[in-house]
Amino acid sequence: MKNNIINLARQVINIESNGLKIVSKSINHNFVKAINILKKTKGKIILTGIGKSGIIANKISSTLSSTGSSSQFIHPSEASHGDLGTINKEDSIIAFTFSGKTNELNDMFFYAKKNNIPLIVITKASNSNIKNVSNVCIELTNLKEACYLDLAPTTSTTAMLALGDAIAIVLMKEKRFTKKNFYSLHPGGELGKKLLLVKNIMHTGNKLPLVEEKVLMSKAIIEMSKKRFGCLGIVSKKRLVGIITDGDLRRHMKNDILEKTTKQIMRKKPKTINQEMFVVDALEIMEQNKITQLFVVKNNTPIGILHIHDCVELGLI
């Protein structure tokens, strides 16, 4: 009994996996044509579908919106009762339909045809009606459903999902969508934390632990204690020339340290970062170099400081 369950589960996954390979090999000029239409779309990319196809369409709409392509899901039934008015001539439509004969989609299809709105249909079984009204028809043919009765849409819906994701990611690449763009659309949650820029959280202004290179260590230590970053940036003519950390103080404690200047104690060429760097990348530099703070510089002038505790507070560690 146990083995039968495991074997059937594996069979389902293998069938759907093979289906994705078929879809991958079948991508052709129609896919390219669809991408070109969507790239030129000045308005929204409208997603639609009924039942399981509608759920897939809704998900792809969300993915498009979060990767730089303005999108909206419209249910075909709602479209037939007024929501067609939300679709304008600068929009494009992507319709998912398993059978290719979904009557609820007809009103949207004919509206698109009448108003010269580009229509892309993704279906398992196309027909003459779809080919007449659509600008592009992407057919998911030769797919074996994972349902042993060959009734429930399984492989076909997985294929629709994968194809929709392929459209979203190709558009993302074509539009040169970057991590910074992604952060602007995902400022909250775990994704937002990972895409925070250093400039968003760095300490600036009077908070910076900075002293001149000729300052005596007796005064420098007071400044280090006051700023509480465990380090001092040493500057000359406003340029960062060195750093002194708690560890440096311990190493020089027996050598009349209070009578020496910061230049005599500092370590030259400290690790620095720029304000446009992602915080997670700055954290990686800290971990690789086993340090707990980084000065943020612009033209080698310190403008901020990032401490590992800032990363801890964000939950990145």
Image (cartoon, grey):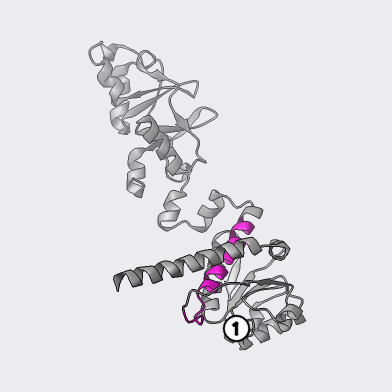
Toward the viewer: 111 or 243? 111
Q: Which residues are magenta?
A: 148-172
For badge 1, the amino acid type reads Pro
Q: Is residue 57 above or below residue 268?
A: below
Toward the viewer: 258 or 68? 68
- Is residue 1 toward the left or the right of residue 297 in the image? left
Q: Is residue 161 above or below residue 287?
A: below
> Is residue 153 located in the magenta-colored stretch of the structure?
yes
> Is residue 149 located in the magenta-colored stretch of the structure?
yes
- Is residue 272 toward the left or the right of residue 311 in the image? right
| Quadrant including the N terminus | bottom left
User: Residue lying furthest left in this view?
Assistant: 254
Residue 152 percent coordinates (x, y): 49, 80
Q: Is residue 161 above or below residue 172?
A: below
Name the quadrant containing residue 255: top left
- Would you name the residue on which mark 1 appears? 76
Name the quadrant containing residue 125: bottom right
Q: Is residue 3 above or below residue 285?
A: below
Tell me the residue at 43%/38% (across/down): 282
Q: Is residue 175 visible?
A: no
Q: Dot 1: what SS?
A: helix
